[in-house]
Image (cartoon, coloured by chain):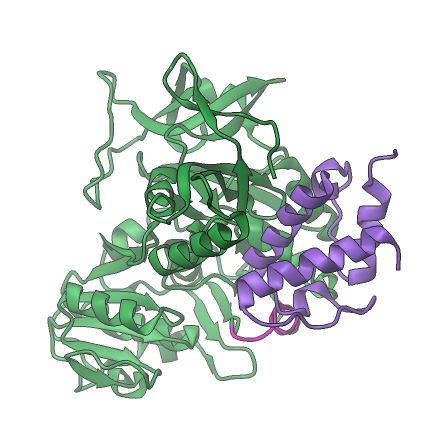
Amino acid sequence: MNELEQSIRQVFAQVWAQEKGSAAPELTPDTVLLESGLDSLGFAIFVSSLDEELGFDPFTLSEDAFYPQTFAEFVAFYEKYRPKA
Amino acid sequence: MRHLAAELGAAALAAPGGARLERGDLAALGPGRAVPAGAVVAFCLSDPAALIRGVVALDGHAGAMLLLSGALAREAAEALIARAGAGVLVTDRADLAPGCATVGIADAAVAGGVRAGDAQTRWLLTTSGTTGLPKIVAHTLGSLSRSVYRFGGQAAPVWGLVYDPTRFAGMQVTLQALIGGGTLVAADTHLPLAEQVAALAGAGVTHLSATPTLWRRLLMVPGIGALALKQATLGGEIADQTVLDAVARAFPGARVTHIYASTEAGVGFSVNDGQAGFPADYLNAAPGGVRLKLADDMLWLKPPVMAPQTGGATVEIDAEGYVRSGDLVRIEDGRIHFLGRENGLINVGGVKIYPETVENVVKTVPGVALVQVSAKKNPLTGTLVLAEVALAPGAEAERVRRAIQETCRAALVREAVPAIIRFVDGFETNAAGKLVRITKGAA
């Protein structure tokens, strides 16, 4: 697991704890994000919290209209738009 | 306009996996004995199809119908029932104990029930405010169905209902189908979204209306392509180009429409070219006989007929009859784009939030010296609430963060609870006396 994916998992766990007050479920590559248990507001908070933590938001950077469905797609989406050092 | 059962078009109501009511079944619905004529009736139902049967049966019989979301918290539901002075509650929930008679839908809406006369029933809908209790706004069947388009027999659409029908947008879709003609498929909003989508696709839904926030969520559902839409409508929030493109790409056969509506002016219009904003040509001629003008980035609208003002809101009208919309806009490349609300009102997925209200709650938290609440752009909900906080000397950031969240959660609707809390070293004021954040060392 690379550093970016680790950060994403960490922020997911934080947002989950904040929104649901419980321990976050395990995310596997095939986890469908919508079925993870976070509702649309929770998911929006997750994306904005990642923006705060990582300093970028691929949904805003992306030119094409793409909405990732699984966790693996989500991580790949962030990988693709990660600012090059 | 007569009561709803008398105004039905070639309509049918389908609950996925449940019963289907044809026009004749719907038209035959009337009040049960449990509901006296002229009563104020509150509905709090988790089954949207039951709510729709209820309003068809009781419109023209009840004095007023208070439509409460089936998901409303018990305390809020009971407070609103009392505030509306309801004499009967129709519910499928066991936890509500209002001080009035409580019946199930089967006793409130019965086949062959007879209305006492044809009263003008008031429709009481709720709007979510920034703080706990929703506001009650009175409508009539006429005011709610003003924009209904009446379809001819063959082209009758199949509408998917994914909004809560107790809310303004959801009731608009409901009345469009019932009065305009077509089948209304009410999704079971308790199911995971993927199952709702599968049910809507299975029912042959061709027309779907949702907020941009909900569309973005729908587009993340595997199997969304199974919906064979002819019409996709976005409303209730600013539709950006990304979401319009994504909807168009997901439904190549669909007409994509986004709607601008001004509650201040009581009018709206739709845009069908798939581009964000609306053509600047609308300043010369807008759809529906609405007239538009801009002054200092502010959009002013002149409705063809001045709507009666509801909800006690004060609107500003100029000498020529134009209503100040409160929406800030910008002209760019022949399009008029929406920038947001002039008073800093934050729209989180369709829920409108006053930053000052949130600031006043955050200020009460020990350890908070100064706070500024603003909108943070979010690609999924349009915006989220951002609180920038300067700590009092000696206060510990993580403890204050948790206290802010707990305090806000108790006092505010969920959308108004700051999603992002950022600690700053301090604020300075600019020439206009407005707080300006000092950016160094922001955590």
Q: x, y percentage for residue B201?
A: 65, 69
Q: x, y percentage for residue B40?
A: 15, 70
Residue B262 visible in rendering: yes
Magenta-colored stretch includes residue B140: no
Tell which residue pokes out farthest to the top in this image: B431
What colour is chain A? purple
Q: Quadrant of the C terminus of chain B?
A: top right
Can you say whether B47 is above or below A55 in the image? below
Predominant SS of the magenta segment = helix
Residue extent of the magenta highlight: B190-200
Q: Nearer the viewer, residue A61 or B104?
A: A61
What colour is chain B? green
Can you say whether B294 is above or below B360 in the image? above
Tell which residue pokes out farthest to the front in this image: B394
Q: x, y percentage for residue A29?
A: 83, 66
Residue under the image location 39 percent in, 44 percent down: B353
Can you say whether B234 is above or below A6 in the image? above
Residue under the image location 67 percent in, 65 percent down: A34
- In the drawing, does residue B389 fall left or right of residue A48? left
Q: Nearer the viewer, residue B373 or B326?
A: B373
Residue B230 visible in rendering: no
Q: x, y percentage for residue B199?
A: 62, 74
